[in-house]
């Protein structure tokens, strides 16, 4: 394959969370084409995206090897800076300490107004956040995830109302998520879960009312002085949400497999 083909495939797979596949592609490209800063960057990013200590170490190795070959590559420098700023200064003092040197090198190489300079400022702004800023960021991330789940639930509810889903391209992630959800919610025993997905907001409101009523009834009856037993009513709606999350993970696996199959067919045709 050509360099551009490797890069395009890495970008496609990274966008849908195929980090393992990106690493394999980048390693294959480096083996076939030789040292390349862009492929080293994708290799590092695909490790760093896993957000685990071992993968962070592998990402650092990829960036260092790439910079040994191309010391002035801004893409590698900024990616490495982001990794170093994210490192815990007590656990990884060496990695954390390298951020200052990387910042100086980027400032020299990246002219004001360049994409790299803008990204460095974003990274430095993120690194300089305090506790409350971190808390707000985590809250915003959780809100985005809840909004994505709610949107997915609405898509599934619409498909359930229509009695199925129209055919879609196998690499259409949103359609794949709906298809996977319909599979996981199929069957007579899962009818209550399908009902909750179709009326998700009403299900949450009704559950909240049941929780309050159950806890109050138990306290007023003298059975307990303080009750949390009512919260068990949330089990069914949480199970429905768990199915939707499982469907999203399954859909990503299927889309990644479809992309890899297309890549393989392209390679076979070219050969």
Image: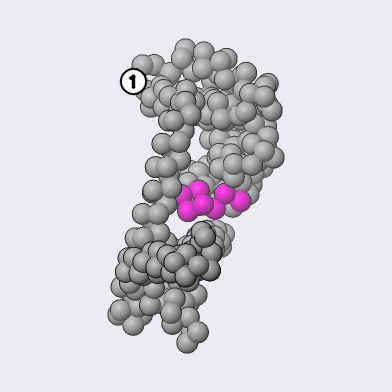
Q: Residue furthest bottom?
A: 188
Residue 258 appearing in the image: no
When the figure is inspected, residue 40 is found, relative to residue 211, above or below; the finding is above
Q: Position of residue 238 (x, y in %)?
A: 48, 65
Q: Is residue 101 left or right of residue 168?
A: right
Residue 63 appearing in the image: yes
Is residue 178 magenta-colored?
no
Relative depth, front residue between 139 and 115 = 139
Where on the picture, by quarter, is residue 66? top right
Q: Position of residue 240 (x, y in %)?
A: 46, 69
What colouring does the structure picture have?
one colour
Q: Residue at x 43, y 18 (%)?
A: 110
Q: Position of residue 76 (x, y in %)?
A: 54, 28
**Residue under pointer 1:** 113
Q: Residue at x 39, y 68 (%)?
A: 213
Give the secondary structure at mark 1: loop
Relative depth, front residue between 240 and 228 = 228
Is residue 17 magenta-colored?
yes
Residue range in magenta is 14-20
Quarter of the picture containing the C terminus is: bottom right
Q: Residue at x 54, y 53 (%)?
A: 18
| Number of numbered markers | 1
Q: Position of residue 157 (x, y in %)?
A: 34, 72
Q: Residue at x 64, y 42 (%)?
A: 52
For disc 1, the neighbor class at 10 Å (few under 14, some 14 to 19, many from 20) is few
């Amino acid at each position: 394959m050509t360099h551009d083909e490797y890069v395009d495939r890495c970008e496609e797979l990274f966008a849908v969370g195929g980090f393992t596949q990106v690493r394999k592609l980048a390693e294959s490209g480096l083996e076939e084409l030789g040292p390349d800063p862009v492929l080293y960057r994708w290799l590092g990013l695909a490790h760093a995206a896993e957000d685990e200590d071992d993968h962070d170490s592998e990402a650092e190795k990829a960036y260092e090897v790439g910079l040994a070959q191309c010391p002035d590559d801004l893409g590698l420098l900024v990616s490495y800076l982001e990794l170093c700023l994210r490192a815990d200064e007590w656990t990884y003092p060496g990695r954390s300490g390298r951020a200052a040197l990387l910042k100086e090198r980027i400032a020299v190489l990246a002219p004001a107004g360049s994409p790299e300079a803008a990204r460095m400022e974003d990274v430095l702004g993120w690194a300089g956040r305090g506790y409350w800023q971190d808390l707000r960021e985590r809250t915003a991330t959780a809100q985005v995830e809840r909004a994505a789940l709610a949107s997915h639930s609405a898509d599934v509810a619409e498909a359930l109302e229509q009695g199925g889903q129209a055919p879609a391209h196998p690499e259409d992630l949103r359609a794949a998520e709906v298809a996977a959800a319909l599979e996981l919610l199929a069957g007579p025993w899962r009818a209550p879960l399908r009902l909750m997905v179709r009326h998700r907001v009403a299900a949450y409101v009704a559950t909240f009312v049941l929780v309050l009523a159950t806890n109050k009834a138990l306290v007023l009856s003298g059975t307990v002085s303080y009750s949390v037993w009512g919260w068990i009513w949330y089990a069914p709606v949480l199970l429905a949400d768990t199915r939707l999350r499982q469907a999203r993970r399954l859909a990503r696996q299927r889309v990644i497999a479809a992309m890899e199959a297309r890549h393989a067919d392209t390679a076979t045709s070219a050969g």
